[in-house]
Image (cartoon, grey):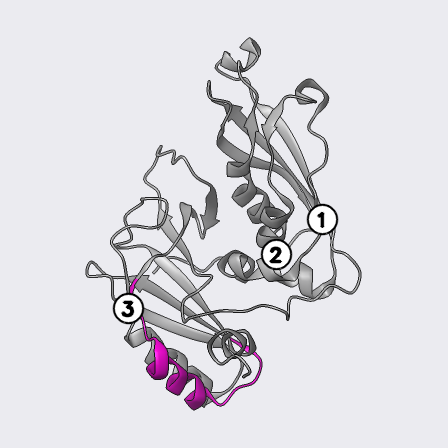
Amino acid sequence: MIQRIATALAVMALACASGAAAQPTAPAKDLSGRWAKTPSGGDMAAAYPDRAMREGVGGKATLSCKVTTDGLLAECVVASSTPDGYGFDQAAMLLSQGFQMQTPVPARYAEPDARATIPIVFQAPPGQSMRRGVLKGFGDGTIVLTRLKDGETPEGPVARCGEARCSVGMVVWAERPAGPDAVAILDRAGRTDGLTLADCDIAKDGRLTTCDYRGVDDPKAKAAAAEAVSRMRAAPQTREGSPTAGAHVQIPFQWDWLIAGMKPAD
């Protein structure tokens, strides 16, 4: 099984509900004014690392990327990230797909070793909390990590997964508990808050295997998460079109968010 990466990446999509008003800094001087597209405030909020948001910590990461003739960023690496241990490096990599330079791209970026430098600042507003989210079904907010072959360069973002490099995508569920069955599982969890994480690999048929569970120390919550996972099957491809067989997922069961989305008040 692929070594686990930071929880922040796995729950990236959950952070959308926080409304964090983080913004990228202006690009380096040689790129100033040449962006056709940059990540939106929603994109920044979605990528904001979980631990940093919960602790109200801001940070900065600088990307070094090649620029394609279409103005897109490619082969990005994190040149620097601070503070350490909060996942701002991974968040910046996720945001790299949201940048596009105006065309025609300056000729200097056609040079073999030419790279653009993009600093991104994450600023957590005081008093913001992530505990405002809504999940409408089991498996919402799940990231897919697919191990890359040596020399392989995907179009989308890349993250470290142990000693390897992995492409990052969003899972599409072919099957998962829904309706009254899903609500019954939620009731059996007996939780009104807390987070249970399911770390699983995806088999060839889309079923989830070799799962580990962590988070709240609650046997009923773990059993409910395992029951939901046993009835989930990933589609053959991610939302971005990458194959899912052999990939790794980390499924967040944020119990209060699931209650808000699956058992709305009358």
- Helix, strand or loop at label 1? It is strand
Which amino acid does the dot numbered 1 rest on? Gly
Asked which quadrant contains residue 241, the reply is: top left
Residue stretch rendered in magenta on the structure: 174-195
- Helix, strand or loop at label 3? It is strand
User: Furthest-right residue in view?
Assistant: 126
The quarter of the image holding the N terminus is bottom left
Q: What mark, if any, has residue 209 been given in the picture? A: 3
Q: Nearer the viewer, residue 264 or 54?
A: 264
Q: Nearer the viewer, residue 6 or 188?
A: 188
Look at the numbered discs 2 and 1 and tell me whether their residues touch, using CB distance below 8 Å.
Answer: yes
Dot placed on the residue nearer the N-terminal end, 3 or 1: 1
Label 3 and label 1: CA atoms lie apart by 35 Å
Q: Tell me where residue 189 appears, x and y as whole percent.
A: 45, 87
Side of 158 relative to 122 (left or right):
left
Q: Residue at x 43, y 75 (%)?
A: 213
Q: Residue at x 20, y 58 (%)?
A: 204
- Asked if 88 appears above or below 235 in the picture, the reply is above
- Asked if 26 appears above or below 105 in the picture, the reply is below
Which residue is denoted by mark 2 in the rendering? 49
Q: Residue at x 70, y 22 (%)?
A: 32
Q: Nearer the viewer, residue 144 or 134?
A: 134
Q: Tell me where residue 109 appears, x and y as whole percent.
A: 54, 15
Label 2 and label 1: CA atoms lie apart by 10 Å
User: Furthest-top residue in view?
Assistant: 107
Which residue is denoted by mark 1 in the rendering? 59
